[in-house]
């Protein structure tokens, strides 16, 4: 019975996380246990546990004696995430270029191909998901367990940040350049392109929000 309950919790967590990251549940939307349980055809227990998990991931905010809501990321939140990403991403890509394996490179190419195909098809949801997947695989290729431990609790918030763009083709093209540098073990190019990618991502983020 407990295994079934755990499995339901994981399923509900995954579904709600995906809906939040895909923008299907916008910032500020109420997440009421009773309503979610009915919609997902589960008891309130896995919903309650899923909401707790999403609070810990930074995607949901709990309101005392009320309901949970999808988190609204403030300018300060975004600045904090961007600073952390700026500190770690060039190192991650440099290490990935040094340490990548054939199997890891194949996985990275596969997700990049999916991102490119989705971008060309103007499938924003899939293209953004695959863009975030690309970064997660690069972190794995860096083969630094401490880096993975630092990244893991921030993963959902970083995935949110990585989906905040509208120019699907531009981001896919930047990832293609980064992939080429990693495949060629061109450490200097990987680090330089990562820094350029960060700067371009900031521009695309501001553009997606109508900011100059």
Image (tube, rainbow, N blue to C red):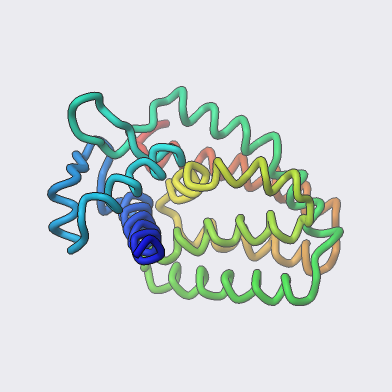
Q: Check the image and report above or below for 82 versus 192.
A: above
Q: As rendered, which of 67 and 118 lies closer to the eye?
A: 67
Q: As rendered, which of 92 and 18 lies closer to the eye?
A: 18
Asked whether residue 124 appears in the rendered view, the answer is no
Horizontal side, residue 11 vs residue 177: left or right? left
Q: Which image quadrant is residue 63 in?
A: top left
Q: As rendered, which of 66 and 46 lies closer to the eye?
A: 46
Residue at image location 39% in from the left, 73% down from the top: 121
In x, y percent, where is residue 89? 69, 44
Residue at image location 33% in from the left, 49% down from the top: 20
Q: Check the image and report above or below for 110 versus 180.
A: below
* Outermost residue to the front: 1
In x, y percent, where is residue 137? 64, 61
Residue at image location 26% in from the left, 44% down from the top: 26
Task: Count how many numbered circles sit on residues in the image.
Answer: 0
Residue at image location 39% in from the left, 59% down from the top: 6
Q: Quadrant of the C terminus?
A: top left
In x, y percent, where is residue 58? 43, 37
In x, y percent, where is residue 187? 85, 55
Asked whether residue 27 appears in the rendered view, the answer is yes
Horizontal side, residue 69 vs residue 178: left or right? left
Q: Which image quadrant is residue 172 in?
A: bottom right
Q: Quadrant of the N terminus?
A: bottom left
Q: Which image quadrant is residue 51 in?
A: top left
Horizontal side, residue 141 vs residue 60: left or right? right
């Amino acid at each position: 019975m407990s295994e079934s309950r755990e499995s339901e919790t994981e399923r509900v967590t995954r579904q709600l996380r995906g809906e939040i990251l895909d923008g299907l549940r916008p910032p500020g939307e109420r997440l009421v246990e009773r309503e979610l349980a009915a919609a997902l055809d589960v008891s309130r227990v896995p919903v309650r546990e899923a909401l707790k998990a999403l609070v810990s991931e930074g995607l949901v905010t709990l309101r005392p004696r009320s309901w949970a809501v999808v988190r609204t990321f403030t300018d300060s939140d975004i600045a904090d995430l961007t600073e952390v990403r700026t500190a770690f991403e060039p190192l991650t890509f440099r290490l990935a270029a040094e340490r990548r394996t054939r199997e890891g490179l194949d996985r990275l190419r596969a997700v990049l191909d999916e991102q490119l195909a989705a971008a060309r098809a103007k499938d924003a949801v899939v293209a953004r998901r695959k863009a975030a997947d690309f970064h997660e695989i690069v972190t794995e290729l860096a083969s630094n367990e401490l880096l993975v431990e630092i990244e893991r609790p921030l993963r959902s918030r970083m995935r949110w940040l990585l989906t905040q763009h509208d120019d699907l083709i531009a981001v896919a093209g930047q990832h293609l350049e980064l992939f080429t540098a990693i495949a060629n073990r061109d450490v200097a190019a990987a680090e330089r392109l990562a820094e350029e990618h960060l700067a371009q991502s900031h521009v695309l983020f501001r553009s997606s929000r109508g900011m100059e």
